[in-house]
């Protein structure tokens, strides 16, 4: 996709299902004062591979970009892949670019492969990127249990809130609620058995 100067592009994507899914996102900012925001959530609840490859090129001054990629792998044979590339070229001075990928592994053999990549050639920029892969925090689960909330309910609440940072960016409340309900169903083994 080519983005004209002073334009704004926002992508919010929630992906699940399918044995193998891959999305290639390629964006190039064609002028100054351009904003790009990418928010993605990949959910792998079976023997599935969710794969996102993204490329964002900033060539002009005062570009702004944010990329948030999250994945939840809730099956021992599930995997998620993220290969994200943000390139800030020489004339993209005063650019503000951020890239963050966070992954939640809920099964011992679940797999994620992440490769955030930030290439900066310009010198007057504010750029950052990061990656985190973890299971649920024991201290967070303890916090819920100390308040009388059982472990399973605590786990469900924490997993849903992990994904909520992405699906709450959907601008339509009815679609947002539908996505939330679907994620709840997919993560609840008792609901899967009764479907």
Image (cartoon, helix red, strand yellow):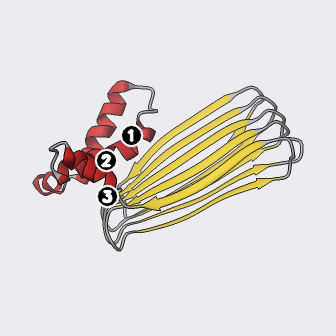
Q: Residue at x 35, y 31 (%)?
A: 175
Q: Is residue 51 visible?
A: no
Q: Position of residue 2 (x, y in %)?
A: 72, 39
Secondary structure at numbered mark 2: helix
Q: Position of residue 166 (x, y in %)?
A: 45, 40
Q: Name above or below for residue 57 compared with residue 171.
A: below
Q: Name the residue tied to disc 2.
A: 158
115 left or right of 113 in image: right
Choose the circle earlier in sequence order: 1 or 2: 2
- The residue at which mark 3 appears reads as 138
First-in-chain label (1 vs 3): 3
Closest to the observer, 119 or 50: 119
Q: Nearer the viewer, mark 3 or mark 2?
A: 3
Residue under the point 42% across and 61% down: 134
Q: Is residue 27 left or right of residue 169?
A: right
Above or below, 84 relative to 65:
below
Toward the viewer: 69 or 142? 142
**Which numbered dot is residue 164?**
1
């Amino acid at each position: 996709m080519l983005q004209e100067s002073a334009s704004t592009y926002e992508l919010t994507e929630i992906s699940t299902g399918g044995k193998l899914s891959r999305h290639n996102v390629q964006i190039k900012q064609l002028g100054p004062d351009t904003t790009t925001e990418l928010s993605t959530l990949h959910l792998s609840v079976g023997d599935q591979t969710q794969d996102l490859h993204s490329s964002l090129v900033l060539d002009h001054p005062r570009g702004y970009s944010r990329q948030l990629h999250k994945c939840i792998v809730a099956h021992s044979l599930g995997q998620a892949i993220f290969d994200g590339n943000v390139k800030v070229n020489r004339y993209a001075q005063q650019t503000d670019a951020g890239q963050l990928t966070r992954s939640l592994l809920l099964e011992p053999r679940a797999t994620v492969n992440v490769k955030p990549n930030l290439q900066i050639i310009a010198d007057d920029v504010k750029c950052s990127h990061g990656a985190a892969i973890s299971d649920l925090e024991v201290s967070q689960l303890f916090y819920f249990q100390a308040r009388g909330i059982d472990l399973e309910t605590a786990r469900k609440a924490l997993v849903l809130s992990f994904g909520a940072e992405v699906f709450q960016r959907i601008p339509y409340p009815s679609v947002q609620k539908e996505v939330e309900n679907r994620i709840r169903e997919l993560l609840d083994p008792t609901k899967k058995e009764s479907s």
